[in-house]
Amino acid sequence: MNDLRNYHNRGDSTFSGESSQWGDFYGLDDLFTENPVVVKGLSQLWSKWISETGIDGFRIDTARHVNPEFWKAFIPAVQQAALAKGKSSFPIWGEVYDTDPMNTSWWVVNGGLPSVLDFPLQDRLFNFVARGATNPLAMLFNNDEYYTTARTNAAMLGTFLSNHDMGRIGGALNSRDQSPEVVLKQDELAHALLFALRGSPIVYYGDEVGMTGGNDKNARQDMFPTLVDTWRTEPRVGGTPIGNGSSFDAVNPLKDVITSLNQLRASNPAFSSGSQIVRYARDGVFVVSRFDLSNRVEYLAAFNSNGNDSIVSVPTVTTQGAGWSVISGSGTSVASGTGVTISLPAYSWGIFKGDNSLPVPNVPVVTLNRVSMDPAVTDRIALSAKVVGTDPASVAFYSQASGSKKWNYLGTDLNRSFSNSGIDGNLYRVFPPKSQFKSGTTVVFRAVATNSSRVSTTSRIQKFKISK
């Protein structure tokens, strides 16, 4: 790093065109990451941190401002170092500061990153909690399949509410001229969403004691006693300004809520690795099913962003007449057939566990729909399939090149799509990049559905010619 030839030396970035990857980031010298010497040196340095400190994962800042070829060489080297240290699970999240999942998913599918921080979800969670926006949240989960490849999926995304750039969820909620009691309930609701929905939840330090620091530097207050008047007098969600005290000693209801949610997730694998089906997204209420197929259990996670009590009825898979037990939050449920009516107080959530096991499913019947180019992202191929029934099945997609006998695995969708109108709902999908296939050739595709009892069937094939 003492060799000036290992830097781009282009001056400050304009954040457009080639300058976005070659320019200095607000005065920070930009490394020449196209240079093999830099690739090797950084790979060795980060690998050394793993081998010598036992670090458990990386959050990579400003990842979109580095050329993808670097990540495609660097990431495997770092992952190999983690494996050598005995870390078979080593999360790496790249920061791609963008709320459009089409842009963030590009860096997973094409850009060499194993996963990214889920800025699109952070945006939708805040707008649901603060403004009752349900449809954008449901539609975001419909786009999860844009992250799906043979090695990646949306469950690997790093989900969060606050960070050191955008500020804290407590501050954003506290700025909306509402009573402290409402802000606390909304903050708790936001964390319930974070822990109950798909992804790997990341809690920004200080949120558990109600810190409210705003954008950038104001969100970087430490936990120790401070002499900075701004931080000594800063309002706290669920508490009072820290004054001369230490935030490590602060008592706050948010800490108890986050601790209990973490325990819920640890003791119920449906929330860390189970499939997710959106059940209801309307009028400020959002409901999903989460599944633990190993134990054949369905959970309902229901969230009410309204300032009044809400009652909704949702379908389920669980055996007719099953009871449901509240295991987190509040609310009540009344089963009717294979559905359930849920009542939730204002600004609250309830997580319900089905008392009965999932019913034994029929052998899955799967239909692979006609293949096309994706109209939303024109460099992707759209594959979709339907499975008869309501069982929480999964669908794996495969391709076969012209003249080959080998089937190539493209990825698996665990979660059916959702639609309030029913149009385009109940689809299993993947969107492989067109560049994955040889242009001008005809490719054969198939789908394999696996039901909750691990019984599989294969669809009829569909052929598609890759345009030049």
Image (spheres, grey):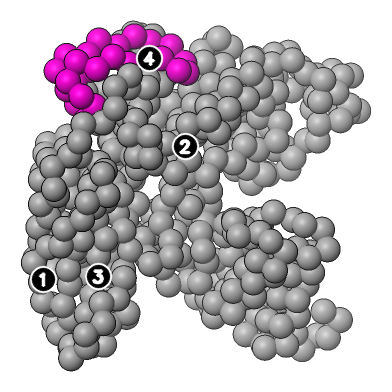
State the image coordinates of residue 162 (x, y, percent, origin top left): 59, 38
Q: CA distance from mark 2 to mark 1?
A: 34 Å
Of the numbered discs 2 and 1, the one sitting upstream in the chain is 2
| Label drawn at residue 325 | 4
| Label drawn at residue 461 | 1
Of the numbered discs 4 and 2, the one sitting upstream in the chain is 2
Q: Nearer the viewer, residue 156 or 139?
A: 156
Q: Quadrant of residue 150?
A: bottom left
Residue named by callout 3: 398
Q: Amino acid at mark 3?
A: Tyr
State the image coordinates of residue 432 (x, y, percent, origin top left): 30, 69
* Residue under the point 53% across and 48% down: 158
Q: CA distance from mark 4 to mark 3?
A: 40 Å
> In the rendered structure, which segment of residues is drawn in magenta?
315-342
Image quadrant holding the N terminus, namely bottom right
Q: CA distance from mark 1 to mark 4?
A: 43 Å
Image quadrant holding the C terminus, namely bottom left
Q: CA distance from mark 3 to mark 2?
A: 28 Å
* Residue under the point 71% across and 31% down: 206
Q: Amino acid at mark 1?
A: Ile
Residue named by callout 2: 269
Q: Amino acid at mark 4?
A: Ser
**Labels 4 & 2 near each other (Cβ < 8 A):** no
| Image side of residue 343 versus residue 423, left or right | right
